[in-house]
Amino acid sequence: QVQLVESGGGLVQPGGSLRLSCAASGSIVSIANMGWYRQAPGKQRELVATITRSGSTHNADSVKGRFTISRDNAKNAVYLQMNSLKPEDTAVYYCNADIREPYYSVKNYWGQGTQVTVSS
């Protein structure tokens, strides 16, 4: 059973930084695209950033210049470095990945989410 487990969320003051981590575990042949999404109260889930296996990245306009996505293919992990945090960044952050398991085609998986709260 493949799982994505996030960590690193918490409470931070405006202008502060946090680093989110997500590790995939289970029977994994390979992982293609990985990404981070977020969902604020009363809003739809939105894309934050994605990264391909080769390292090409895409960031939402709202986080460009402040957030950096990276990954470690050897550890099946993806990270999100968040700097210059704003109150509007407050949300539950979800890890997402396209994972190939033995004998299966690629499946899309979500983590359970980690809360990020930006407040003074």
Image (cartoon, grey):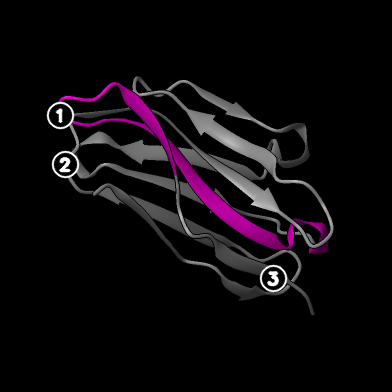
> Label 2, on which residue?
27
Q: Amino acid at mark 2?
A: Ser
Q: Which element carries disc 1, helix, strand or loop?
A: loop
**Numbered range of the magenta stretch:** 87-109
In the visual, does 57 lie left or right of 88? left
Q: Which element carries disc 2, helix, strand or loop?
A: loop
Q: CA distance from mark 2 to mark 3?
A: 33 Å
Tell me if label 1 and label 2 are in contact, CB under 8 Å: yes
Horizontal and vertical percent position of residue 36: 55, 43
Horizontal and vertical percent position of residue 26: 19, 48
In the visual, does 79 lie left or right of 41? left
Magenta span main SS: strand
Q: Which disc number belongs to residue 117?
A: 3
In the visual, does 40 lie left or right of 18? right
3 vs 1, front mark? 1
Q: Amino acid at mark 3?
A: Thr
Mark 2, other Cα within 10 Å: few <14 / some 14–19 / many ≥20: few
Horizontal and vertical percent position of residue 23: 32, 51
The earlier-in-sequence mark between 1 and 2 is 2
For the C terminus, the quadrant is bottom right
> Label 1, on which residue?
102
